[in-house]
């Protein structure tokens, strides 16, 4: 018995040695997810970094987004994890980020160029430097200009409201026999810009979630009505339960809808997949009664508190956040940059032959001036994801005919209150 | 060729045989020291050790989780809340109407799962039965046909869900074919009825081959002469089926139903990829509910998820006991243990 | 051809069509279409370009648009089938599209530019394979490493499963001891617990044992499969006890009885379990994704999921890599088919 156990244990160890890889000093592990080419671009940049800094070995772990979203938190709570990670759940996990202030060469450079978004990724009231945004995103619409032309419908102008867009798109739908006039991604984040444009405010005076207000109710009712009338694509919203994200991009790419409300991150995707099939334009966000707001967001690269090797993390972060690298990354990935200096200098030469791309990117830069204060506060608000989740879950149940709007509002308030109460324990 | 294979086989087996012979000596000593009871422990030990650490222990921990609150993931960081989560889950004014419950999504999931289990297990058993009967006929190339029906069992659930989502979506392959045949396209996955039917259908598609083979095995074990005798008596085929085939197939049928039931209650991956639980919540099943509440949503509630899984587990244990009882009565008939 | 016809038209009796012949025929052919069709379509789709994958309505085969080099233009131009205003149909090359009007040119006669409404043109396409769906990931994707990890996990897990499960099944079927029903009940009860339900506690265990980011963390939780114990026990119950008693008379030790008598007799059921274990472990996805976050440890299923981003999923790569990962499973199946069926047939699942 003992012999057998020892033998198996030895065998297991021998083979297991192949399986367990200890972290080495000088190693910096970066957990990274990709929506498009950015994984290749960053690998390329990191290779150059390693040539210049032979002592530091940066390992890029490309993972599924699911890993960043679901698994990273478990690692962090166990005091483990990579040294650097690209994350989107910036605020909720903010306690785990490393303060880079002592490890970067020039903290003032960081504060000056990325400071505006630090509150998105650090605990309330803290003054640390947690990382920088690899990209800023802004929600906004895309119109299929060719479909509008074919239908002989004028594209609504810059101050057009959601009603104007819904009506114009519905005319295109009728004339071009489309299955739906327009679509919004299935996401609470996506409809929050429009909600705010109709006067919604999610945040109560004490920082907790406020009950669902008239602004939310106005847009939610419009959306549900448009869906019932067949103008807004039902499929994307009812095709999942819970807060699962679903994009309507494929419908737009195939000219099945005339108008698509999503965000700046779609530009590269639309450009590759639409090619020359039709002309498309970015429109910014349609207006409501209070303004024409979109919602900003994005992914950040942050240092992790549990790293064994913060000096090297600082060096890697300094390199990646330097102006020429940010500019190169932006140009190659077609992302909107967060770096103030890069934006102020202009002259970003996006690497794309598609004339639609540059126009669209410029439109988004322009639209970022329209963000209302209530929307600008959301990325740094810790209960935002609870609010977004409740919005999607319940509104899609209304669209599927399972709840009335009144019931949905009540459920939303309960869902949000439950989650806040749970999280405060 | 054959001898080469045998030689390689022997060469590979040699160290294993040697090892087995090597541990025989100490084991004999152990056996004489502890008797056969000790041997039972020895044979059970490796499996139960792994089983205990990686299955049983987490289950117990899960129970503790169900009594704690907060969003932290590790037990030491979680405050004790008693039966709070159970109270929340069981708080309904009318148990037949999920909308009257505090946690409406849980009860919707319970109702959907129950309906799914009944439909899926029932239909799949019938389909597996017909397939097995047909494969048991005097077919040419039977192994090919067997393979045809068994093939999807090999695919991963994620792939199964994806393939069918592309086929069933609004402008998917099925609607394309309908359109070519002059029919009206149907938006399968946004229609409550069709989405549920698709969930049932796809899970049958993915698993029916396995169960058909179990039944086929049973059919092939039925002595031919029974059928020949029935044919000589001029018994109609329908009667032969009810009087001979079905009773002799009962043990296999029970295994099929037990295993299918277990799989059906756990249904998750395929349907999650296929419908995501939609439209609305009409294909939201229990495992998805637990997974989303405890793991996938941005503000997790592991305590609530654990409580839901414990409730689900309680129901399952009752079901298992019933099955165990059934199979015991059954094997009692055969004179086994 | 004649043989196929003969085969397809085989009937139950010698003369005339019995209704069961028709049912059989319909069931088998229908089964062939429904069971194989979707998988074939998956393979076809994996050769489509991203734009074509998103295309509505879908095509059965992958296509690429035809291009032609036209005198006076640097880049190759895309060809379209055009219906002109006078109803004439021609194949033209497109120079550029402005709004809803396309400027086209006849490749044979490049001098004259023809303006066409875009609704009157369809791209001229031919069947073509987007092989870059396969080659690209092979360049950026450490395929051989992931393959090695997958093979290691699959083989180790299967081996341990077979040894521990068969030992436990032997004890549960051939010994009378106190607590046997309890053990059986425990195993049966956990048959019903899906992994996704105990994710968080199981993760705590793995992390406490230091098995996080280790292939053993993937292997160990899966090997104590209750299904395996259940299956093997059912089979071993059919082995007559007299055989064992006879061996005991010959002074065989319990271990020898297990190793020399019971295991060989259980071979068909072991084969079934081995095959299923290989397929399960090869396809495992959720658990490895949680345990492994370092690329040198990725299994193939985890690796191919790095193409699933937050806002965008690169389906063309995922599909192609899915097809690649299916190949070993299909091979296992083709070569071991007779074991599967014979094994299940014999495995006393009664």
Image (cartoon, grey):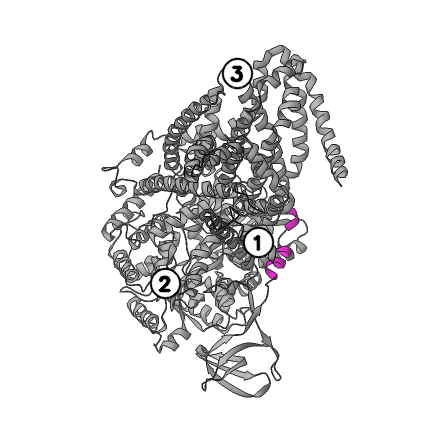
Q: Nearer the viewer, mark 1 or mark 2?
A: 1
Quadrant the N terminus of chain B occupies:
top right
Main secondary structure of the magenta stretch = helix
Regarding residue A268, the answer to whether it shows in the image is yes
Chain letter of the residue beneath label 1 in the structure image: C
In the image, taking residue C188 as reference, residue A386 lies left or right, namely: left
- Residue A159 position, x and y percent, is 32, 71
Residue range (magenta): C129-145
User: Local crowd at mark 1 within 10 Å, few (<14), some, or many (≥20)?
Assistant: few
User: For residue A117, which quarter of the picture?
Assistant: bottom left
- B116 is higher (above) or lower (below) than A117: above
Regarding residue A122, the answer to whether it shows in the image is no
C-alpha span from label 1 to label 3:
57 Å
Q: Which mark is residue C6?
A: 1
| Residue C62 lies within the magenta run | no
Q: Residue furthest bottom?
A: C111
| Residue C141 lies within the magenta run | yes
User: For residue B321, which quarter of the picture?
Assistant: top left
The residue tagged with tag 2: helix, strand or loop?
Answer: loop
Q: Which mark is residue A115?
A: none
Q: Which mark is residue B184?
A: 2
The residue tagged with tag 3: helix, strand or loop?
Answer: loop
Which residue is denoted by mark 3 in the rendering? C176
């Amino acid at each position: 018995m003992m012999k057998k156990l020892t033998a198996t244990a030895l065998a297991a160890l021998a083979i297991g040695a192949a399986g367990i890889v200890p972290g080495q000093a000088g190693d910096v592990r970066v957990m990274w997810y990709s929506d498009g080419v950015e994984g290749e671009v960053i690998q390329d940049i990191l290779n150059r970094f390693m040539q210049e800094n032979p002592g530091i070995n940066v390992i890029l772990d490309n993972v599924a987004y699911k890993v960043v979203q679901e698994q990273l938190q478990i690692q962090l709570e166990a005091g483990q994890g990579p040294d650097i990670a690209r994350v989107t759940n910036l605020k909720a996990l903010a306690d785990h980020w490393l303060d880079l202030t002592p490890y970067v060469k020039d903290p003032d450079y960081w504060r000056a160029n990325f400071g505006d978004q630090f509150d998105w990724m650090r605990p309330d009231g803290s003054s640390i430097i947690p990382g920088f945004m690899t990209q800023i995103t802004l929600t906004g619409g895309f119109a299929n200009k060719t479909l509008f032309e074919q239908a002989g419908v004028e594209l609504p102008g810059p101050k057009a409201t959601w009603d104007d867009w819904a009506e114009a798109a519905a005319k295109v739908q009728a004339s071009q026999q489309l299955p739906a006039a327009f679509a919004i991604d299935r996401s609470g984040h996506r409809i929050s810009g429009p909600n705010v444009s109709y006067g919604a405010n999610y945040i109560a005076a004490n920082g907790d979630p406020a009950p669902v207000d008239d602004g939310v109710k106005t847009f939610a009712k419009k959306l549900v009505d448009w869906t019932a009338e067949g103008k807004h694509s039902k499929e994307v919203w009812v095709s999942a339960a819970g807060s699962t994200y679903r994009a309507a991009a494929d419908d737009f790419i195939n000219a099945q809808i005339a108008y698509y409300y999503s965000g700046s991150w779609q530009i590269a995707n639309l450009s590759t997949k639409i090619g020359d099939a039709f002309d498309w334009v970015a429109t910014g966000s349609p207006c409501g009664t209070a303004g024409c707001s979109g919602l900003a967001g994005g992914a950040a690269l942050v240092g992790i508190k549990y790293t064994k090797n913060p000096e090297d993390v600082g060096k890697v972060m300094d390199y990646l956040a330097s102006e020429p690298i940010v500019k190169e990354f932006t140009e190659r990935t077609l992302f909107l940059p967060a770096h103030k200096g890069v934006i102020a200098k202009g002259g970003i030469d996006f690497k794309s032959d598609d004339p639609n791309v540059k126009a669209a990117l410029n439109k988004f830069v322009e639209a970022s001036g329209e963000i209302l204060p209530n929307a600008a506060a959301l990325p740094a608000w810790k209960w935002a994801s609870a609010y977004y989740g409740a919005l999607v879950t319940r509104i899609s149940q209304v669209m599927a005919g399972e709840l009335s709007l009144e019931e949905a509002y009540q459920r939303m308030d309960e869902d949000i209150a439950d989650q806040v109460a749970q999280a405060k324990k | 060729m054959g001898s080469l294979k045998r030689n390689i086989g022997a060469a590979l087996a040699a160290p294993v045989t040697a090892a087995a012979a090597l541990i025989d000596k100490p084991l004999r000593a152990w056996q004489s020291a502890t008797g056969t009871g000790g041997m039972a422990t020895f044979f059970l030990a490796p499996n139960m050790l792994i089983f205990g650490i990686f299955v049983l222990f987490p289950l117990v921990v899960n129970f503790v989780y169900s009594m704690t609150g907060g969003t932290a993931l590790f037990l030491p960081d979680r405050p004790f809340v008693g039966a709070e989560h159970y109270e929340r889950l069981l708080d309904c004014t009318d148990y037949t109407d999920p909308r009257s419950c505090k946690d409406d999504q849980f009860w919707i999931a319970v109702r959907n799962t129950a309906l799914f289990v009944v439909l899926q297990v029932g239909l799949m058993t019938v389909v597996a039965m017909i397939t097995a009967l047909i494969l048991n006929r005097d077919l040419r190339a039977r192994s090919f046909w067997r393979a045809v029906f068994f093939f999807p069992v090999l695919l991963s659930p994620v792939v199964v869900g994806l393939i069918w989502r592309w086929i069933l979506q609004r402008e998917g392959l099925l609607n394309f074919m309908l359109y070519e045949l002059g029919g009206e396209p149907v938006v399968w996955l946004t229609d409550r009825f069709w989405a549920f039917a698709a969930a049932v259908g796809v899970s049958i598609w993915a698993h029916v081959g396995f169960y058909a083979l179990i039944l086929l095995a049973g059919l092939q074990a039925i002595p031919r002469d029974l059928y020949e005798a029935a044919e000589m008596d001029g018994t109609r085929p329908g009667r032969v089926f009810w009087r001979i085939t079905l009773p002799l197939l009962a043990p296999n049928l029970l295994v099929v139903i037990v295993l299918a039931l277990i799989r059906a209650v756990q249904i998750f991956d395929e349907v999650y990829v296929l419908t995501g639980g939609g439209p609305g919540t009409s294909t939201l099943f229990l495992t998805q509910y637990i997974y989303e509440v405890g793991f996938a949503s941005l503000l997790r509630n592991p305590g609530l998820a654990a409580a839901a899984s414990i409730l689900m587990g309680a129901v399952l244990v009752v079901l298992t006991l019933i099955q165990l009882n059934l199979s015991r009565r059954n094997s009692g008939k055969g004179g086994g243990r | 051809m004649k043989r196929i016809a003969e085969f397809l038209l085989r009937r139950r009796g010698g003369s005339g069509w019995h209704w069961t012949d028709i049912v059989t025929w319909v069931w088998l052919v229908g089964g062939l279409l429904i069971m194989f069709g979707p998988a074939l379509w998956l393979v076809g789709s994996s050769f489509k370009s991203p734009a074509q994958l998103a295309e509505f309505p879908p095509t059965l085969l992958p296509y690429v648009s035809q291009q032609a080099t036209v005198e006076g233009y640097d880049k190759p131009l895309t060809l379209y089938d055009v219906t002109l205003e006078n109803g004439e149909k021609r194949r033209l090359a497109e120079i550029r599209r402005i709004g809803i009007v396309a400027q086209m040119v006849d490749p044979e006669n490049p001098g004259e530019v023809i303006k066409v409404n875009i609704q009157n043109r369809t791209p001229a396409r031919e069947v073509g394979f987007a092989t870059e769906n396969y080659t690209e990931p092979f360049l950026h994707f450490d395929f051989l490493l992931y393959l090695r990890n997958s093979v290691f996990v699959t083989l180790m897990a299967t081996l341990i499963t077979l040894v521990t499960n068969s030992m436990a099944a032997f004890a549960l079927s051939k010994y009378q001891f106190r607590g046997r029903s309890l053990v059986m009940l425990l195993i049966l009860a956990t048959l019903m617990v899906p992994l996704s339900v105990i994710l968080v506690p199981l993760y705590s265990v793995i992390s406490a044992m230091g098995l996080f980011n280790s292939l053993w963390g993937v292997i160990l939780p899966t090997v104590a499969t209750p299904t395996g114990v259940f299956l093997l026990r059912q089979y071993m119950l059919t082995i007559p006890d007299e055989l064992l008693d006879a061996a005991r008379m010959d002074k065989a030790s319990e271990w020898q009885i297990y190793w020399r008598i019971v295991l060989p007799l259980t071979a068909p059921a072991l084969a079934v379990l081995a095959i299923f274990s290989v397929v399960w472990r090869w396809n495992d996805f959720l658990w490895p994704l949680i345990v492994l976050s370092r690329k040198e440890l990725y299994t193939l299923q985890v690796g191919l999921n790095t193409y699933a981003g937050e806002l965008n999923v690169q389906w063309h790569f995922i599909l192609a890599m899915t097809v690649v990962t299916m190949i070993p499973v299909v091979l296992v199946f083709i070569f071991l088919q007779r074991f599967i069926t014979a094994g299940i047939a014999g495995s006393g699942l009664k």
